[in-house]
Image: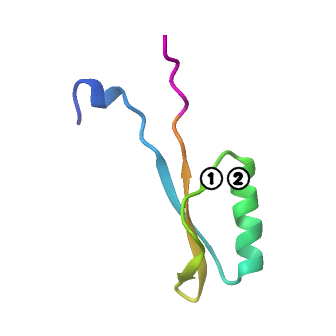
């Protein structure tokens, strides 16, 4: 468990999104982008299909 200022910092969530073909992956990426996720890498081969890394950024902090 972290203490101090690092404990208050929110982390960027990362997720591997994959599908068996590029058409289904495109649909999957589009559905994630509607929920606030953003594409973090290019589409690459993953297992028997294709995949990419997506991330969910932490909320913006207000600077006074």
Tell whether label 2 touches label 1 (CB within 8 Å). yes
Residue 60 magenta-drawn? Answer: yes
Residues packed near mark 1 inside 10 Å, few (<14), some (14 to 19) or many (20 plus): some
- Residue at (52%, 59%) from the top-left corner? 15
Residue 15 magenta-drawn? Answer: no
Q: Where, by quadrant of the figure, is residue 44 drawn?
A: bottom right
In this picture, residue 37 sits left or right of residue 64: right
Asked if residue 61 is positioned above or below residue 53 in the image, the reply reads: above
Asked if residue 54 is positioned above or below residue 60 in the image, the reply reads: below
In this picture, residue 20 sits left or right of residue 14: right
Quadrant placement of the N terminus: top left
Q: Mark 2 — residue?
A: 33
Closer to the chain start, of discs 1 and 2, is: 2
- Residue at (70%, 52%) from the top-left corner? 33
Name the residue at the bottom extreme: 48
Asked if residue 27 is positioned above or below residue 48 in the image, the reply reads: above
SS class, disc 2: helix
Q: Specify start and end residues of the magenta stretch as a single range.
A: 59-64
- Residue at (52%, 86%) from the top-left corner? 47
Image x and y of residue 54, in percent: 56, 58
Residues packed near mark 2 inside 10 Å, few (<14), some (14 to 19) or many (20 plus): some
Name the residue at the front extreme: 64
In this picture, residue 29 sits left or right of residue 62: right
Image x and y of residue 13, in percent: 48, 48
Image x and y of residue 41, in percent: 54, 65
Q: Where, by quadrant of the figure, is residue 11 drawn?
A: top left
Q: Which mark is residue 38?
A: 1
Asked if residue 56 is positioned above or below residue 6 in the image, the reply reads: below
For the stretch drawn in magenta, the main secondary structure is loop
Image x and y of residue 30, in percent: 75, 60
């Amino acid at each position: 468990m972290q203490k101090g200022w690092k404990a208050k910092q929110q982390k960027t969530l990362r997720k591997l999104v994959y599908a068996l073909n590029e058409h289904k992956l495109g649909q999957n990426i589009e559905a994630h982008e509607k929920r606030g996720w953003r594409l973090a890498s290019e589409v690459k081969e993953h297992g028997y299909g294709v995949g990419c890394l997506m991330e969910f950024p932490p909320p913006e902090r207000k600077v006074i």
